[in-house]
Amino acid sequence: MAKPKEGDKAPDFTAKDQNGKTVSLSDFKGKNVILYFYPKDDTPGCTAEACSFRDHYQSLLGKGFAVIGVSTDDEQSHKKFESKYSLPFPLIADPDKQIVDAYGLWVEKNMYGKKYMGTARTTFLIDANGMITKVIDKVDTKNSSQQVIDLLQ
């Protein structure tokens, strides 16, 4: 699938979070959503990104945003990640890659000359009507929440 862009309707999804709860993007209709995709639980960049959203979570809620993280890790991995770093938002398990595919984010990557498939770290800002208002392709993991806040100014 092609990656959705600003002005597109955000692809809906239904999957389980770290607590085994079924979550759909449509559950958040009427709210603004920060939907962020990350490669792997408990790795340095992904931890920095999740902790940035955690540390600014109340501020983002105050601006009317819900935060949802998505990776291809399973529910157990997400639960450990949430517990270890006290993450206050849902982490969606996408082990069958349906959500990352729907968002066009399952891509070929290249590290040290080795090619492999993985999730392209990307953040989508979605408005209350389910429309994508911003796409952040170059995520600054340590300052991911500040990148979002800067876009909202």
Image: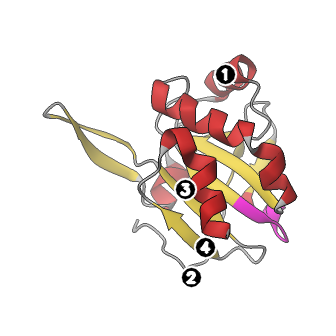
User: Residue flagged by tag 2: what amino acid is it?
Assistant: Gly
Looking at the rendered structure, the kind of residue marked 4 is Ile
Q: Amino acid at mark 3?
A: Thr
CA–CA distance in space, label 1 to label 3: 23 Å
Q: Earlier in the sequence, mark 1 or mark 4?
A: 1
Helix, strand or loop under label 3: strand
> Residue 143, image x and y in percent?
56, 44
Q: Which residues are magenta?
A: 26-33
Residue found 72% across the figure and 61% down from its top: 33
Quarter in which the N terminus is drawn: bottom left
Circle 4 sits on which residue? 132
- Contact flag, marks 1 and 2 (Cβ < 8 Å): no
Closer to the chain start, of discs 1 and 3, is 1
Q: Nearer the viewer, residue 4 or 58?
A: 58
The residue under the point 63% across, 49% down is 145
Colouring convention used in this rendered image of the protein: secondary structure
| Dot 1 and dot 3 residues touching (CB under 8 Å) | no
Q: In this view of the protein, which residue sits in the foreground, 134 or 24?
A: 134
Name the spot of residue 132 as percent of width and height, x first.
Answer: 61, 73
Which numbered marker is on residue 123? 3
Q: Secondary structure at mark 4?
A: strand
For this view, does 42 lie left or right of residue 39? right
What residue is disc 1 on? 76
Dot 3 or dot 4: first in sequence order is: 3
Query: Label 2: which residue?
Result: 7
In terms of depth relative to the viewer, which is nearer, 80 or 61? 61
Question: Counting other residues with Cα less than 10 Å from the Cα at mark 3, is it few (<14), some (14-19), or many (20 or more)?
Answer: many
Tell me which label, 3 or 2, sits earlier in the chain.
2
